[in-house]
Amino acid sequence: MTSSMHAPSQGGTQTRADGPDPTLRVLKVGPMVHGGHCVAQHLGRVIFVRHAIPGETVVARLIGAGPSDRYYWADTVKVLGASEFRRAHPWKLADPLRAYQAGRRPVEGAELGHIVLDHQRRLKAQVFRDTLDRAGQPNGDDVEVRVKGIVADEPAGLHWRTRTVLAVSPAGRVSLPVYRSPELVPVRNIPLSVPAYDDLRLWDLRFTGAARVEVTAASHGSQVLVSITPGPQAPDGRRVRRDQIDGWQHQLARLPDHVSAQVTVPSQEPNRWPEVIHLHGDAAIREQVATEHHGTRTFKAWGDGSWPVHRDAPMTLVESVLSAAQPHSGQVVADLNAGAGLFSAFLADAVGPRGAVLSVEPNVQDSQAAQANLRELPQAVALTGSVEPILAGWLHTRQAGIARGLAGRKVDTVVLNSPNAGPGLSVLRQVHQMHPARLVYISGNPVSLARDMNHLNQQGWRLEHVDVYDLAPNTHHLSSVSLFTRR
């Protein structure tokens, strides 16, 4: 996409807001699409408007353009005809109305904060349905879609985020980025994050020389991990780097004992793991997941590893996945892209010692955490490697027991935690060739889900039902757990 932006000029003066700024437009806002934008039209061009609500009339500032200026992005800067579902934004730095008045743009991360929570979920449900319809999903009309929220998030949708990556400004201050811009805005609070973030007061510290600071808090506990990633090092900058790390360690030593700290130094060589320098405390977070129907388990998770971000997402997703998978004693379940083994552990409990769970995770660090989390469950095997070659080995090594599950048994159910872009058609074909009775597909992207639904339909799978969750209030993100069975 081009970085240039030229405002559409033909006949545009009659729809410009008062004033000399040629990037301002008065727009009647249409439906919302995936990404949190509302669609508007101006002189035959599409404009994707952030911070608006369908049906509103707004003044929007153009902030970027697509290839050949075929479409534009814009921020709402003034509301001329407000929706009944508009509210005061709960985060000043993310509110475009106050941000533009202060001469800057809003930070990323709360693009739906101007909408009351119930209507956010209605809009997310509509976006989900529309995405399936546009992709031509064959039985999408037969599936009821209602976005479920977390009771503890009512009414404002704040204090749910347990993992946040903060950029660092040239002055060493923790900051957040601006949408489609290199600009960084220093922050002094993060209302979407759990209260432990604000308690740290990292904005009072200086991380000069760092590229980013990642903060991880236990979902239901006091433990916090602060991980600092240094910026690029000059060829002769070893001593400078050492002095920087000493300075960070000195500042972080003032934090409470339940706060751990480390420095993660990216490798200069390809395909090499970064060097982790432990400053103090534990490098792993202990996560306790208490479910309503499947008991309570404690997990080890790395700060930068794979783990649900919302504080109540682990228990919510475990309940949904196990309800869809319906595992019972003696079954074989493949858990693909299994992360730290969250689903694998509960699935292993369900299938019992006569069953088997094959927990596959490409990330070495996450797979090591899964091995630790599954150590007391001998029926669960944690396998490190990319999903596609591992499935290919199962399918083509016919003499090995694992080719058909374990001990000659077939895989009964596949749980597939999809990457944002989807698992790829080759993986879906491999899953089909394994002949499971059920496929539980976990997704955070309705676009890739809709595409894969079509492919699965062509292979003879039917969407039985889908649970859609709002596990990221005040943002456009949603999560879904879909159950597919063979027709």
Image: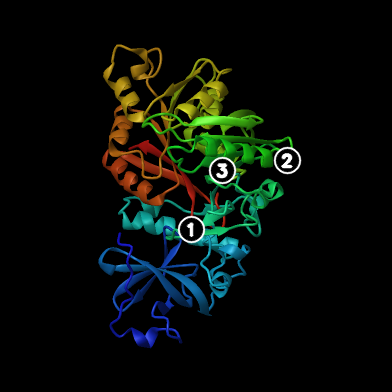
Q: Residue under circle 1?
A: 124
Q: Residue under circle 3?
A: 214
Q: How many marks?
A: 3
Q: At label 2, which amino acid type do we have?
A: Arg
On screen, residue 376 versus residue 141, left or right, reads right
> Is disc 3 placed on a helix, strand or loop?
strand
> Is disc 2 placed on a helix, strand or loop?
loop
Front residue (pair 116, 370): 370
Residue 110 horizontal/vertical position (percent):
54, 59
- The answer to whether residue 313 of the structure is visible from this angle is yes
Q: At label 3, which amino acid type do we have?
A: Glu
Query: Which numbered disc, 1 or 3, marks the residue closer to the eye?
Result: 3
In the rendered image, the quadrant that contains the N terminus is bottom left
Contact between labelled residues 2 and 3, with CB atoms less than 8 Å apart? no
Front residue (pair 265, 105): 265
- The answer to whether residue 284 of the structure is visible from this angle is no
Give the residue at x 35% y 68%. Answer: 72
Q: At label 1, which amino acid type do we have?
A: Lys
Q: Residue under circle 2?
A: 254
Query: Which numbered disc, 3 or 2, marks the residue closer to the eye?
Result: 2
